[in-house]
Image (cartoon, grey):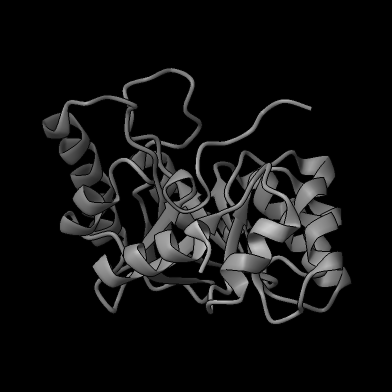
């Protein structure tokens, strides 16, 4: 058994049943993804739409592809035929574009709203108040081909577990506050938080979906 397969089995053995594992496969070759596929992994996360589309074409069709990176509006059309979940939605304009492209393919595309919980400036996302305004907006009520399945957030890159926990708790609290809103295209089930370094803390704080890359596939290769 390859180390990728061993890593994957080990991580899965540490996850509670209600937590979904997204194997973050960005920059990794298809051969690595197939090693994970061959021991049952069916959910892969990519951060570049073109790379994800290429892998979708080349790989088995029972895979769920998650877009976990920042999404540019002009690229949505390339993933609209097949993407299962878009994690990083942070404004209504992007939702309108996803809806438009989903309609062309007669699909409903599931999305998560990205909430900014980190203290770093570089992280994208909306405030909890922005999210409420968006969810209660008339514009959202007109988008019949998207479904907002919950929230996503990324903690500050730090060794301070107290800070990470505090940020994850903000996301969980935001989810709990927004959950009672009754909107036909808002079906909050997913809290996507936690990566290789902090997914165990995230699960303790209420995460239902973790995005793990380097702990499965090894460190990323950015060259080439």
Q: Locate the C terminus and report the quarter of the image it occupies.
A: top right
- Report the residue at 51% width, 58% height from top: 4
Measuring from the top left, give residue 220's x and y in whole percent: 57, 36
Measuring from the top left, give residue 9's x and y in whole percent: 39, 69
Can the viewer see residue 141 in this picture?
Answer: no
Q: Quadrant of residue 55?
A: bottom right
Total residue callouts: 0
161 vs 74, left or right, is left
Given residues 128 and 65, the one toward you in this image is: 65
Given residues 151 and 6, the one toward you in this image is: 6
Q: Quadrant of residue 147?
A: bottom right
Can the viewer see residue 183 in this picture?
Answer: yes
Measuring from the top left, give residue 81's x and y in whole percent: 82, 69
Q: Quadrant of residue 102?
A: bottom right
- Report the residue at 53% width, 79% height from top: 40
- Report the residue at 77% width, 70% height from top: 82
39 vs 195, left or right, is right
Measuring from the top left, give residue 26's x and y in whole percent: 64, 46
Given residues 126 and 56, the one toward you in this image is: 56
Given residues 216 and 201, the one toward you in this image is: 216
Which residue occupies the extreme left position in the image? 162
Residue 132, relative to residue 185: is it above or below? Answer: above
Residue 151, relative to residue 39: is it above or below? Answer: above
Which residue occupies the extreme top position in the image? 121
- Report the residue at 66% width, 75% height from top: 63
Residue 164, relative to residue 192: is it above or below? Answer: above
3 vs 25, left or right, is left
């Amino acid at each position: 058994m390859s180390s990728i397969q061993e890593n994957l089995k080990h991580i899965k053995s540490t996850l509670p049943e209600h937590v979904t594992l997204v194997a973050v496969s960005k920059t990794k070759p298809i051969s690595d993804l197939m090693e994970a596929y061959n021991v049952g992994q069916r959910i892969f996360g990519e951060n570049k739409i073109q790379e994800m589309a290429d892998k979708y074409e080349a790989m088995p069709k029972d895979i769920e592809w998650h877009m976990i990176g920042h999404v540019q509006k002009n690229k949505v059309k390339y993933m609209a035929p097949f993407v299962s979940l878009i994690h990083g939605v942070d404004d209504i304009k992007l939702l309108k574009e996803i809806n438009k492209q989903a309609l062309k393919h007669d699909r409903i595309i599931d999305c998560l709203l990205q909430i900014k919980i980190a203290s770093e400036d570089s992280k994208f996302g909306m405030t909890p108040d922005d999210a409420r305004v968006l969810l209660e907006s008339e514009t959202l009520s007109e988008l019949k081909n998207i479904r907002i399945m919950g929230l996503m957030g990324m903690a500050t890159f730090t060794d301070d577990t107290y800070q990470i926990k505090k940020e994850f708790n903000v996301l969980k609290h935001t989810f709990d506050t927004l959950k009672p809103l009754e909107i036909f295209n808002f079906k909050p089930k997913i809290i996507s938080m936690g990566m290789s370094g902090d997914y165990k803390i995230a699960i303790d704080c209420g995460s239902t979906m973790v995005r793990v890359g380097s702990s499965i596939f090894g460190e990323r290769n950015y060259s080439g």
